[in-house]
Image: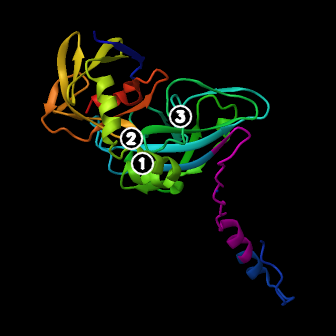
């Protein structure tokens, strides 16, 4: 008998006067000239300093994955904002979603969940679900945004307002603070070296015994998640096959590989958000985290990477 594992998910497909000459005789003409020069000399404003830390949050870095190509508009770039939240007087409810990023006090962008490849950033919370940060505690979070390339040019101000942070409006940085990377792996390796190293270990192939046990638990079972009120089922079968079904109809599928921390699904092709096949290219594998449950079975978490279903 097939077992069903339900996982809820939602696609929500945020810087003198000169004066002390030694000559004591000054003509009226030279005095007038000097006064005119002082009146027309432009004042130089100091560049505003970045404010990266407040009483509740510290921005740890802003990065751009230059390899990302948006299917919506190729001008949009994937921006990662890493920050640490903390509190010593009131409990907070935070999440990585619903953050805001404002450029030059004009254009504001909302964070989008599921667009970032954050598996290698395990030290940071990446979820649309609210998480409590109690007095005395702290939590590292990463939020992802799609921002036009033009708004990432140097010399522009950046205001970062993470969700649930009381004084988030005090945070101000510059686009000159952004680190541009060639890939999401490079972002992870710089921003979260420990999390990245852990993920690389989890991507190593599992040994034969572990592979067999995981397959025994997966094969013949169905893992279900809900996206936009649509039930999507992952059906696994021997020896290493899987199908993605909606209402019993196959919409995609392929082969899977068991690693030390993931069930790595390699699709037969790509589908769009409407589940229409757009390419026979399998693309990169989609990695679903797994772990052992108390009863010895496998717990797999498709919702942790549900965006991987769509290309």
| Sequence-first tag of 1 and 3 | 3
Q: Horizontal placement of 191 versus 208: left or right?
A: right
Which quadrant is the N terminus positioned in? top left
Tell me the tag on residue 100.
3
Which element is circle 1 on?
Answer: helix
Tell me the tag on residue 139.
none
Mark 2 sits on what residue? Answer: 260
* Residue 302 % position (x, y): 37, 26
Which quadrant is the C terminus positioned in? top left
Which of the pair 124/202 is nearer the observer? 202
Q: Where are the magenta residues, as a range?
A: 34-58
* Comparing labels 2 and 3, the label whose residue is closer to the camera: 2
> Looking at the image, can residue 109 be seen?
yes
- Tell me how far mark 2 sits from mark 3, CA to CA: 36 Å
Determine crowd level at label 3: few under 14, some 14-19, many 20+ residues with C-alpha closer than 10 A.
Answer: many
Q: Horizontal placement of 171 versus 202: left or right?
A: right
Q: Give the residue drawn at x 36%, y 55%.
A: 182
Residue that sits furthest to the right in the current view: 24
* Residue 249 % position (x, y): 17, 13
Mark 1 sits on what residue? Answer: 201
Which element is circle 2 on?
Answer: loop
* Residue 49 % position (x, y): 66, 55
Q: Give the residue drawn at x 41%, y 20%.
A: 10
Magenta stretch secondary structure, dominant = loop
């Amino acid at each position: 008998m097939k077992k069903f594992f339900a996982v809820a998910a939602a696609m929500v497909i945020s810087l003198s006067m000169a004066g002390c000459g030694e000559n004591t005789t000054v003509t009226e003409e030279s005095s007038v000239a000097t006064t005119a020069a002082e009146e027309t000399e432009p004042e130089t404003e100091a560049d505003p300093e970045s404010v990266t830390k407040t009483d509740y949050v510290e921005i740890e870095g802003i990065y751009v994955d230059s390899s990302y190509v948006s299917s919506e508009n190729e001008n949009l770039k994937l921006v990662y904002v890493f920050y640490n939240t903390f509190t010593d007087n009131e409990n907070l409810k935070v999440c990585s979603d619903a953050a805001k990023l404002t450029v030059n006090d004009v254009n504001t962008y909302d964070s989008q969940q599921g667009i970032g490849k954050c598996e290698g950033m395990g030290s940071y919370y990446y979820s649309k679900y609210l998480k409590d940060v109690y007095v005395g505690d702290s939590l590292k979070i990463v939020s992802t945004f799609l921002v036009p390339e033009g708004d990432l040019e140097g010399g522009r101000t950046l205001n970062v307002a993470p969700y649930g942070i009381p004084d988030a409006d005090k945070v101000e940085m510059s686009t000159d603070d952004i680190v541009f990377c060639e890939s999401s792996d490079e972002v992870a390796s710089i921003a979260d070296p420990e999390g990245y190293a852990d993920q690389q270990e989890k991507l190593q192939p599992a040994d034969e015994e572990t592979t067999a046990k995981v397959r025994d638990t997966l094969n013949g079972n169905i893992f279900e998640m809900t996206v936009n009120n649509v039930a999507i089922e992952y059906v696994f079968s021997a020896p290493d096959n899987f199908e993605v079904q909606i209402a019993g109809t196959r919409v995609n599928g392929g082969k899977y590989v068991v690693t030390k921390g993931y069930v790595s699904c390699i699709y037969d092709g790509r589908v769009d958000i409407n589940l229409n096949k757009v390419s026979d290219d399998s693309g990169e594998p989609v990695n679903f985290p797994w772990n052992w449950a108390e009863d010895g079975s496998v717990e797999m978490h498709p919702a942790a990477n549900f965006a991987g279903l769509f290309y």
